[in-house]
Amino acid sequence: MNFSIIIPVYNGADTIAALVENLFRELQDSEIEIILVNDGSADNSVAVCREIQQHRPEQVTFVNLSKNFGEHNAVMTGLRYARGNAAVIMDDDFQNPPSEVNRLVAKLEKGFDVVYGQYERKHHSLFRNLGSWFNGMMATVLLKKPKGLYLCSFKAINRFLIDEIIRYTHPYPYIDGLIFRVTRRVGMVTVQHSPRAVGKSNYSLARLVRLWLNMFTNFSILPLRIATILGCITVVFGMVIAALAVYWAFTDPLAPAGWPTLVCAMVIFSGTQLLVLGVIGEYLGRLFLGQNGTPQSIVREVTGANSASKPPTEAQSR
């Protein structure tokens, strides 16, 4: 199988050259192309990626985005330039060993649409592991993710799934949500996870929250249903408080004259209204941004074997 390797690059100048060379060495018996997507890096990743592409002009395509759009947006851009029968998505930090790529692709050939790498031991920080746990728990509820499956960024997808995923043009993609919207043919392969050799994780709390919001509001209406249920519970709770206030008024002549009940009711109802309005506003805001043409990504330049022909869906992504 010939396949594409998509690598979103963000401040990866210290690792990306060695990663690419290791990939070509490990996969020298395979027909591959590598697509590097620079996602608005603040270091000299652009210069390094250009040098890599010039060294292997027929095997490497370099896509430079106009600014930082986020990892999932960068992956979507790379998939639009992929020409292989399958694609492997991996990070630029060398924590996914190149030697594991063939194992994912081999498993993919057994009839799966997607194969996720499953780490024997994760070398992430406690904060990142907690975030991954929460993300996986929510994905099980919202996306019907199989229990026990870790949503690893290191995965292989076949051509059918690539073509379905790149049809999505809204500005807030979530790759795993798009995958589970299309298929349940999911495979897993146990892979190694290497310690980070350079730098630190680019996933801050703010980035993780944005990722969770993409999953919550783009691929499920469950938050709206939760808001409705919460509103009903609050109404019942308010009625119980009112009944207790009437009871106290008749049974205890020294009971305070109404203000505790009023304050409690105001706090409960005001908080519930703000919560429900916030959930609805998030949905409406994303709908508005999608309708007013907010781009999923904007490509500043493309160099490489795939640069001559613009992907058919790129015009939509702009």
Image (cartoon, rainbow, N blue to C red):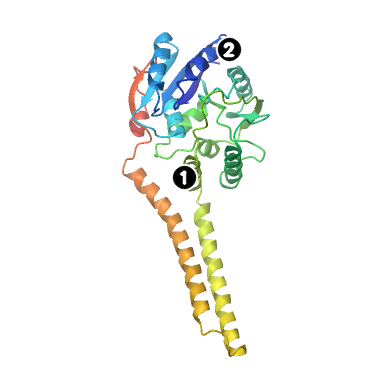
The front one of 268 and 312 is 268
Q: Nearer the viewer, mark 2 or mark 1?
A: 2
| Image x and y of residue 156, in percent | 56, 26
Residue at image x 43%, y 56%?
278
Q: Earlier in the sequence, mark 2 or mark 1?
A: 2
Distance Cα–Cα, label 2 vs label 1: 38 Å
| Image x and y of residue 308, in percent | 34, 17
Query: What residue is disc 1 on?
Result: 218
Residue at image x 64%, y 30%?
118
The front one of 129 and 308 is 129
The front one of 78 and 39 is 39
| SS assignment at label 2 | helix
Kind of residue sitting beneath label 1: Asn
The numbered mark at residue 26 is 2
Q: Quadrant of residue 66?
A: top left
Q: Quadrant of residue 68?
A: top left
- Looking at the image, residue 272 sits to the left or right of residue 128; the answer is left
Kind of residue sitting beneath label 2: Glu
| Image x and y of residue 202, in percent | 49, 33
